[in-house]
Image (cartoon, grey):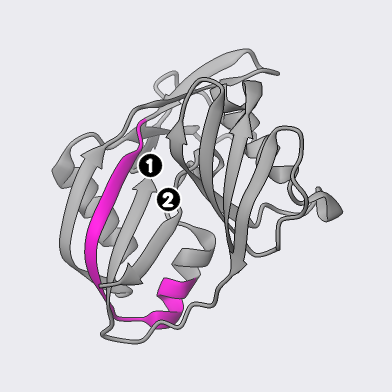
Amino acid sequence: MYLSKVMLSGAACRNPYEIHRALWGLFPADMDASRDFLFRVVQAERTQAEILMQSLRRPEESTREARLLASKEYQLALQKDQRLRFYLVANPAKKINDEGGRENTRGELKKCRVPLVHEDDQRTWIGRKLEGIADLDTMIIEPRFPIRFKKTREDRAGKIQPVSFQGILVVKDALRLTDLVVNGIGPGKAFGCGLLSLARA
C-alpha cells in the first residue's frame, strides 16, 4: 500500500464529489478500475485542501487540481495482542425504511441511511465494526463539521455527519484488522470517511 499527502486547489475543494474525482486523476493508467483508495481531509480552506490518501496503487504525476506532495510505500505487520493507537473519521449510520414508502426495482421498501448522533449509539456502532477484530482500550469520540454535497446531475443536495474516533486498541485478529485498514470502515468513503490509521502505542 501507499500513503500519500496531496494538496488540492480550486473549485474541487468545495464539493466532496469533486475531491473524489480530483484524487481519481492521480491514477490515470486505469481510470475505470474500482476505487482502491481511501482518503481523509486533514485541513481545508475555501480554495485549498490537504488530503491524506491511502491507496493500493502508487499515485502518478500531479494534475492541475491535485498536487502530490509526498508518497511512500508501507507494509502492515500486525500481530495478535499488539497495542496500537488508532484514528478514524467515520460516518456512523443505520438503515431505516424510506418514509415515503417508495420501493426499489425488486418491489422491496427502499432503505435510507440516517446518522447516529448520540455517543452511546456511536460507541455501539464502532464496537460492532471491531467485534472479534480488536478490543477498544481507550477511546474519545468527537463530532466533526457536517459534509455537505450536491449531486450535480440530479440537482440534489445532501449532508453526512462524520465523527472522529481515536484511542488505543488491542489486536485480536490481525488478518481481519488488516482487511479493515485496506477497505475502510463504514459508509461515506467517497466523502473522505472510513480511513483507519494505526500507529504504535
Where residue 63 sits: x, y (%)? 76, 39
Q: Nearer the viewer, residue 99 or 127?
A: 127
Say which element carries label 1. Answer: loop
- Report the span colored magenta: 161-178
Tell me the tag on residue 91: 1
Q: Amino acid at mark 2?
A: Gly
Q: Is residue 40 left or right of residue 5?
A: left
Tell me if label 2 and label 1 are in contact, CB under 8 Å. Answer: yes
Let me know if residue 83 is in the magenta part: no
Residue receiving disc 2 = 186
Counting from the top left corner in percent of width and height, residue 68 is at: 66, 48
Q: In the displayed image of the protein, which residue is found farthest to the bottom? A: 80
In the image, residue 107 sits, relative to residue 57, either above or below, namely above
Residue 98, image x and y in percent? 43, 27
Between disc 2 and disc 1, whose residue precedes?
1
Q: Position of residue 124 (x, y in %)?
A: 21, 53
